[in-house]
């Protein structure tokens, strides 16, 4: 239990005895740095049930706590805030209880707990992963790990968009401009090769449009009549009809992309428990439409199309089946969600990591699933995130101006290497050790820069700024972790044994208070689906540690008990940094 949980019943009892009333909820917050105290109780909400001056109310509660608890040693009241000073003994006992707990803050899943399925990545198989996918993957993976750490079983999944006109464009361009080319012969990852043909298709398409316009067609007519787009549309019809040679080419080129994606995922440090493919799921949901019609949830129009009317819920009418009987994306998503619960019966909720341009789609999807009566539909969440842009502006796949994920990771590693080399702290490192370190720093910089921002916010990504070794960056936090490891290596004495320290330096106390927050931060991050809470907590912990490091002597301390305690405290800070960064998918180096 943390200190607020320990003193909460005493506060309630004091209100009952002193004011002859009962309250259910007490509001706590951290004491502001400019006031004495370790935890603050907010008095203002009590004024609804206790009439009087907030300072007097706070003073009476404070006096009761000092007289009746071991934890509260003194207090002060500022306006409507009761600042409580907690005993060193409490923090020392807490620290000694958790210092050797390697899973501090993490909760194991209960066998009866419903699982959560987290969907992320879900790319198209016509191009490599880009910077936008990087944010998607990092968010989805981190949220999955955080939810798992909060005490739930988690399945990571994705649906791969492997069918449609965009896939046919790459296939057709390969037939026209690249027959015989393979990833091996081209010396390219498969996803890059296929992406190049997608760009080649667009180049040819624009050229044909220009020609048709010069021959007197309007731009709209030219877009529809360009020979290459007509061929791509025919290829899609052939695919849907199961034409063998088209299916064979589709399988071959998709496999090139899957192999490329797998390498990118490995380099990025993300993984999945299951995969769904749109080519297998696009027919799912059609039988659900029939069920919905019978229940009166859906309605059929005179032309045979099927709709759901959500106007009474503040939305609009949404089509779920076309008049020719073909499904729309919404139908497919309904069917896929239901299929996932069939495949994983212990799933009790889902998180969809998808950009904010799909906000409305998911409002409709979740509402339809609720109306269909699925219990798990009450626990669906759209992890909506903003776009990632570069100083140069927006990215466009068709024009080949996207920032390729592989190239970005390579560039980040190179930038980290350049900066680390300039700082000149790599004496004694082999080339192999340097390469590994630069990769850890570069990827850490990339991941932290993206994850420290609230998912809903747009990001302007600046690679060089992210690799800064000072400020709220991944490398700054990694450097502090490595600094602590250096202290532990130099500690040539037994620092495992319990230290009999009884009085804390103020900086030691502040550090323990920050560590104490970690379990609560994990729960809040899981509840809010926000890795930013973990990232910024870790930064605050590092700032607190660096203040401690600057203020007190650690290995130079003469008193052995104090020296042992400070090394133990440093180790726990490092363990907590590593734990938090692991939830974010970020490695920490032992040396730096």
Image (cartoon, rainbow, N blue to C red):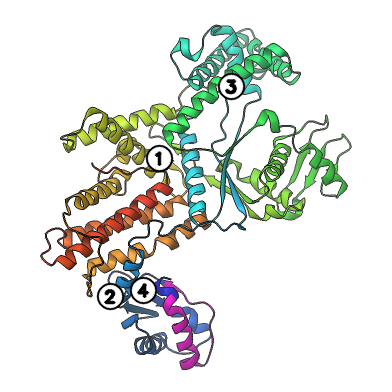
Give the distance between the C-alpha atoms of the residues marked 2 and 4, in whole angstroms. 13 Å
SS at circle 1: strand
**Label 1 to label 2: alpha-carbon separation:** 44 Å
User: Is residue 492 toward the left or the right of residue 517 in the image?
Assistant: left
In the rendered structure, find residue 88 and report the number of the disc placed on it. Answer: 2
Q: Is mark 3 on a helix, strand or loop?
A: helix
Q: Residue at x 66, y 31 (%)?
A: 278
Closer to viewer: mark 4 or mark 3? 3
- At x 48% / y 48%, what residue is drawn? 145
Question: In whole angstroms, how far apart are the C-alphas of marks 1 and 4?
Answer: 36 Å
Question: Tag 4, which secondary structure?
Answer: strand
Residue that mark 4 sits on: 39
Of the 4 image quadrants, the one containing the C terminus is top left
Q: Is 561 left, or right, of 97 in this rendering?
A: left
Please state the extent of the stretch shown in magenta in the rendering: 6-28
User: Residue 81: horizontal and vertical position, in percent?
Assistant: 38, 78
Residue highlighted by disc 1: 460
Write down the quadrant of residue 95 in the picture: bottom left
Which marked residue is nearer to the observer: mark 1 or mark 2?
A: 2
Let me know if residue 333 appears in the view. Answer: yes
| Residue contact between numbered discs 4 and 3, judged by CB atoms under 8 Å | no
According to the picture, the residue beneath numbered tag 3 turns out to be: 254
In the image, residue 135 lies in the stretch drawn in magenta: no
Which of pointers 3 and 1 indicates the residue nearer the eye?
A: 3
Count neighbours of disc 1 (C-alpha within 10 A) and say few if under 14, some if 14 to 19, many if 20 or more: some
Q: Distance between the residues labelled 3 and 1?
A: 32 Å
Position in image of residue 547 (x %, y %): 22, 59
- Quarter of the rendering occupied by the N terminus: bottom left
Q: Earlier in the sequence, mark 2 or mark 3?
A: 2
Label 2 to label 3: alpha-carbon separation: 62 Å
Q: Nearer the viewer, mark 2 or mark 3?
A: 2
Q: Do the residues labelled 2 and 4 touch (CB within 8 Å)?
A: no
């Amino acid at each position: 239990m943390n200190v607020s949980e320990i003193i909460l019943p005493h506060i309630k009892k004091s209100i009952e005895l002193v004011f002859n009333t009962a309250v259910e909820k007490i509001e706590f917050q951290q004491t502001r740095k400019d006031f004495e105290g370790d935890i603050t109780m907010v008095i203002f909400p009590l004024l609804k049930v206790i009439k009087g001056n907030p300072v007097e109310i706070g003073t009476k509660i404070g006096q009761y706590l000092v007289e009746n608890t071991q934890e509260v040693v003194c207090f002060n009241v500022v306006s409507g805030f009761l600042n409580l000073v907690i005993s060193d003994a409490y923090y020392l006992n807490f620290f000694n209880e958790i210092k050797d707990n390697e899973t501090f803050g993490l909760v194991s899943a209960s066998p009866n707990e419903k699982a959560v399925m987290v969907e992320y990545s879900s790319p198209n198989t016509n191009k490599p992963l880009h910077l936008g996918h990087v944010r998607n993957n990092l968010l989805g993976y981190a949220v999955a790990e955080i939810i798992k750490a909060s005490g739930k079983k988690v399945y990571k999944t994705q649906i791969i968009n492997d069918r449609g006109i965009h896939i046919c464009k790459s296939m057709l361009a390969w037939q026209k401009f690249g027959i015989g080319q393979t990833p091996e012969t081209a010396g390219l990852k498969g996803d890059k090769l296929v992406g190049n043909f997608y760009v080649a298709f667009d180049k040819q398409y624009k050229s044909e449009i220009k020609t048709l316009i010069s021959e007197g067609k309007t731009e709209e007519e030219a877009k529809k009549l360009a020979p290459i787009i007509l061929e791509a549309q025919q290829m899609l019809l052939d695919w849907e009809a199961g034409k063998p040679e088209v299916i064979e080419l589709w399988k071959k080129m998709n496999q090139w992309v899957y192999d490329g994606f797998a390498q990118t995922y490995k380099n990025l440090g993300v993984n999945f428990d299951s995969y769904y493919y749109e080519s297998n799921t696009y027919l799912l949901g059609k039988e659900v439409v029939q069920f919905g019609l019978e229940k009166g949830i859906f309605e059929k129009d005179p032309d045979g199309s099927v709709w759901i009317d959500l106007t009474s819920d503040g939305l609009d009418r949404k089509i779920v089946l076309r008049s020719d009987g073909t499904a729309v994306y919404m139908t497919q998503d309904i069917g896929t969600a239901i299929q996932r619960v069939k495949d994983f019966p212990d799933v009790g909720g889902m998180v969809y990591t998808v950009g904010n341009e799909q906000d409305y789609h998911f409002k409709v999807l979740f509402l339809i699933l609720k109306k269909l009566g699925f219990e798990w539909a009450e626990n669906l969440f759209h992890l909506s995130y903003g776009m990632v842009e570069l100083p140069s502006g927006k990215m466009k796949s068709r024009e080949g101006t996207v920032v390729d994920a592989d190239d970005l990771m390579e560039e980040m590693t190179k930038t980290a290497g350049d900066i680390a080399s300039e700082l000149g702290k790599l004496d004694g490192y082999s080339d192999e050790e340097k390469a590994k370190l630069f990769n850890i720093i570069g990827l850490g910089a990339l991941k932290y820069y993206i994850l420290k921002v609230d998912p809903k916010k747009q990001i302007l990504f600046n690679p060089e700024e992210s690799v800064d070794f000072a400020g709220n960056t991944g490398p700054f936090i990694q450097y502090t972790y490595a600094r602590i490891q250096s202290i532990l290596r130099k500690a040539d004495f037994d620092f495992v044994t319990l230290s009999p320290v009884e009085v804390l330096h103020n900086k030691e106390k502040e550090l323990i208070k920050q560590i104490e927050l970690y379990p609560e931060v994990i729960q809040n991050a899981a509840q809010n689906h926000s890795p930013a809470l973990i990232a910024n907590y870790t930064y605050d912990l590092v700032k607190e540690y660096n203040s401690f490091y600057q203020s007190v002597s650690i290995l130079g301390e003469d008193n052995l008990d104090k020296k042992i305690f400070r090394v133990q405290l440093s180790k726990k800070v490092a363990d907590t940094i590593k734990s938090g960064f692991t939830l974010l998918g970020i490695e920490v180096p032992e040396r730096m």
